[in-house]
Amino acid sequence: MPHVALVAFTGIRVREREMLELGMTLPGFRDRAAALARLPALGLLTLAGMTPPHWTCSYHDTDRIIGACARESSDNASAEQSPESSATTHAGDDDDRPDEALLVEVLAQRPSLVAVSALTASVLDAYRFAQGIRAAGVPTVLGGLHATACPDEALRRFDAVVIGDGESVWGELLYDVENRALKPKYHGTTFDLSRSPQPRLELLAGAPAPRYTVQTQRGCPFACEFCAASRLLGPFREKPIECIERELDAIGAIQPEPVIELADDNTFAGRRHPRLLFEALARRRVRYFTECDWRVGERPELLKSLAASGCEQLLIGVESLVHAPPGMGAKRASLQRISDAIVAIQEAGVVVNACFIAGCDGETRASLDRLAAFILDAPFAEVQITLQTPFPGAPLRRRLQREGRLLPDRGWPHYTLFDLTFQPDRMSVAELESAYRHLLREVYGPVATARRSELRREILRKRRAAEATNTAQSVSPERRRFDRRCQLTESRGSTNSRAADDDCAGFGHCGDDLSTS
């Protein structure tokens, strides 16, 4: 009986030593990293659900927070070459060794095939692991956004690569393995989500997962410059409610009233009325987190039911105060409008994690100081600040490559969202790195962290109030002061001509391979 071992290289990675040490002292970063590291790899579990019954499956992951900077002194041995630039990805001599414990664990299953998914920052770990598997005579295949963007690179270390949606070619690939006719490339076509199988959650060994993932749609209707998902995942489409309900019921059988992260790029951006999704989630008493854009805050019919459906937090992009990337479409708006929408969501009883990107074109130390002052005064209950990162497959990467701004000594292990990988246009590399660390210390200091904790408690109190009052509430002095800061920031903020009409715009996550097979 053939066996496929499914291996996920997940976890949060930070390359730069000082950034790693700082990050591990920041409660918000540390807690979020730990939660993400423990999320099951939905793409692999979905493929397991499509595997023919005469095959057996096992699931393995590397759920940990990793600092890849521990051996910088030996970081001089060339390992991989990016196909999109002349940048060399480096790894130290010790780093060339695969995870021996993981190798032993997987090979103990006597697999006929090892199928791997990996984020860009962890892809070298996956390459080293594949070397060990292939040395044992077992074929390997890599899928995901990085493999889709860089298939020829991946084929230097794997026997086969899946390009695009893995579900559409999984049966063919397994058939070829059985017949010893594995092809180097499998080009997936756009997968019809109405045919989505039930993910094989029973493959998750041990106690129930602290959080589960469910995908309600794939891709994004927008085409932001920094995001690869809207290009690599095919056209935006939504999963039928009946398929979502089956997945929720399967999770509920394992963990009643579960905590779920929706593996979506922009959950409420489609044409489906959110009432159907809300009802499905509320009936099962699900607590969930998801990503969407700020326009949710301007939809009263959605806000009325958002908290009641079980939504506890939305991740919403506010982005840069100095640059609005191309491709934002209907999400482009003034900083004041975005902030008002976020306040409306939180007043409806849902915490917003307001996400910002540091280091966009036009960024200076002064603009980052303004960003810190803005965040410290803003009524945002959660805040996330990452560095602009030119992921493979994103137009941003192609632009920076044309401009000769990709740093040649910082390859894939630096693509963490917390490590700088390009030359800023108005600062040196060292200046931006220093300013970014200072920004994090300001925003995640004890006083600011305590203030956001109190904001979250206040939102929870509103959420727990069964009957919302219809009486108009007066605007607090703090809110009036924040509105004035929004106006001042907008009058001073944008230094990029393309962003002169709209200072900021929102998005979900950064576009790395988080929610695909």
Image (tube, helix red, strand yellow):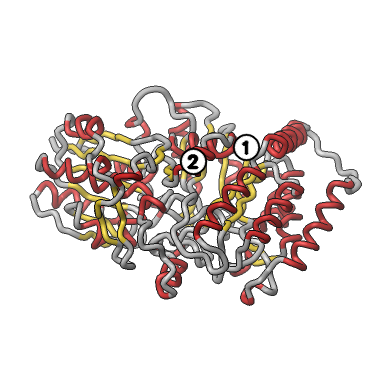
Q: Which mark is residue 411?
A: none
Where residue 245 is drawn, which disc sits there? 2
Q: Which residue is mark 1?
A: 310
| Foreground of the two, 263 or 120 | 120
Residue 461, position as x, y percentages in the image: 76, 32
Tell me the kind of residue under disc 1.
Gly
Instruction: Where is residue 105? Give x, y as percent.
Output: 22, 30
Q: Quadrant of residue 72?
A: top left
Q: Is residue 375 above or below residue 29?
A: below
Secondary structure beneath label 2:
helix
Relative image position of residue 149 (x, y in whole percent): 34, 62
Q: Is residue 495 above or below residue 50?
A: below
Is any part of residue 240 visible from this angle? no
User: Residue shown at 23%/39% (left/top)?
Assistant: 98
Work out whether residue 189 or residue 108 is closer to the camera in this orientation and state it: 108
Residue 480 x %, y %: 87, 52
Q: Nearer the viewer, mark 2 or mark 1?
A: 1
Q: Is residue 271 above or below residue 452?
A: below
- Label 2 neighbour load within 10 Å: few <14, some 14-19, many 20+: some
Q: Is residue 169 left or right of residue 424?
A: left
Q: Nearer the viewer, residue 76 or 121?
A: 76
Q: Please identify the residue farthest to the bottom as the structure is shown.
A: 497
Give whichever of discs 2 and 1 has the lower sequence position. Answer: 2
**Image quarter hosting the N terminus:** top left
Along the viewing direction, whichever of 212 and 425 lies nearer the viewer: 425
Q: Secondary structure at mark 1?
A: loop
